[in-house]
Amino acid sequence: MSHTTPVGPDHSPGRTSDDAEAIVALRTAFAAQRAAARRDPAPGPDRRRQDLAALAGVITAYRRRIREALSADFAVHPEGFADLVEVLGVAGRAAFAAEHLEEWMAPEPRPAGPGLLGTARIDVVHQPKGVIGLISPWNFPFDLSLGPLADMLAAGNRVIVKPSEYTPACSALLREMVAEAFDPERVTVVTGGLELAREFPTLPWDHLLYTGNPEVGRLVARAAAENLVPTTLELGGKCPAIVHGDSVTAETVAQIVGTKLVKNGQMCVSVDYCLVPRQDTARFVDLVRAHMRERVPGFAASSDCTGIITERHLKRLQGLLEEARARGVEVVEVDGSGTDAATRRMPLTLVVDPPDDLALMREEIFGPILPVKSHDGIEDAVSYVNRGERPLGLYVFAQDGEVAERVLATTVSGGACVNTCAVQSAVPALGFGGIGHSGHGRHHGVDGFREFSNPRGVVRRGRDDLIDVMFPPYGDALDGVVGSVLGAAGAE
């Protein structure tokens, strides 16, 4: 099985533009923030709380315009979901960080060997890294820009945000919001096209966060490596749902299909494919049909269905289905609503037991297509997952707790859920990120605070130590220390 490059949120709109002014603005902003960071390298907790309050305040104040911008870019976007994720999600992360800031900032004591260091005090002190670059994707334009910003501000950093060109209305609004809430020497937004996207990771950032797909992530990482810039990469991947025989139920289907319908599949932690017991595959498909008929009839024609971001993305998804049909694979339309080209709303479609060489099994789908693969037991399902790249999320459905724990113990993923999906990305206190092909690094909560901080080890010398024995000339004092340690260890 080959799980290759997904086509998820990226930052190149497929066209070039004159970005000269945007690049000048980027470099100017970077120089100004770097100078400000040198003047004030470690803002105190009051300053950080002010920044977090400003972030929470501006995201809630712009609620109506955020809804409008999302609808402009996606053609159709559910308003309630915009409020839940793009507004309340960001405000919640900022509030959580402000609440826990004192404990996160407190020095963390480490034990010292009293024989050598005496009464020395040893601490890890988390200091701001400095100026951070944040490249955010199109699928959650506010949550994935301003959510990580909460962690960065809690850690005392200055930030420049580069949003996606695929969401011009959201990007323009994001720039307006940030300009209202922050001095540009603390946070600013730069917008532009392909050339700006290429320039952004080449600057000597103190840290760089990129959220998108692995193909672009490799380019970002290579560019950052030229300046030895540490990176956090959130890259998505093919997140599986493994279903045990005791859980082929309406409730399991409600969790899997409900997750798949969020943003119409345009979510990095969405279920990319299901592994279902072979003897239950037909029943699973029937349960999906029943769910769509009874819970969300006509979903693709409703205001709850998010439009596919661009016509090009829509054609790609349609091409995945056309390839499957051409190969004689069973394609099951479970919605009944056709695709609306004007609003780019596409119905949920199942693809049953597709071969692994199809594009929809090699690429991250990022849309309302759900492959359903048959397995011959949990070990078979785990083996299938483990032959692919390590996913951002893994979801196991099993009423037998031992089975669920066995799956967790024998697989590796960025995050995981049992009997639900994607919730690991929505918990403010739980670090979120990938591993391997799905990325590295974490944000959210204390994990995000630490990700964007320098854990500086500090030794404050005390009394009654033996530090001087390390300095030449070496003689009886050093021999005595070595002899006492070796003697205590029973060495010859």
Image (spheres, helix red, strand yellow):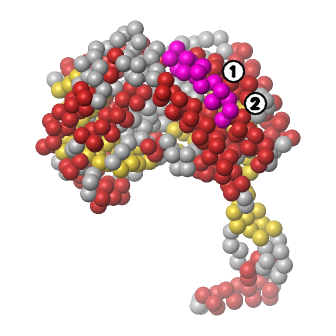
Q: Secondary structure at mark 2?
A: loop
Q: Cβ–Cβ below 8 Å for labels 1 and 2?
A: no
The answer to whether 158 appears left or right of 336 in the picture is: right
Q: Secondary structure at mark 1?
A: helix
Task: Examine the residues drawn in magenta and state their main secondary structure.
Answer: helix
To which residue does mark 1 refer?
Answer: 176
Residue at screen point 29% across, 45% down:
242
Q: Amino acid at mark 1?
A: Glu
To which residue does mark 2 refer?
Answer: 182
Residue at screen point 62% across, 33% down:
146
The answer to whether 467 appears left or right of 366 in the picture is: right
Tell me which corner region of the image, top left, top right, bottom left or bottom right, holds residue 248: top left
Question: What segment is highlighted magenta in the picture?
Answer: 56-73
Could you tell me residue 311's position as x and y percent? 42, 13
Q: Quadrant of the C terminus?
A: bottom right
Q: Which mark is residue 158?
A: none
Label 2 Cα crowd, 10 Å radius (few <14 / some 14-19 / many 20+): some
Could you tell me residue 378's position as x and y percent? 23, 52
Q: Quadrant of the N terminus?
A: top left
Alpha carbon separation for disc pair 1 and 2: 10 Å
> In front here: 479 or 140?
140
Residue at screen point 55% across, 17% down:
68
Residue at screen point 83% across, 74% down:
462
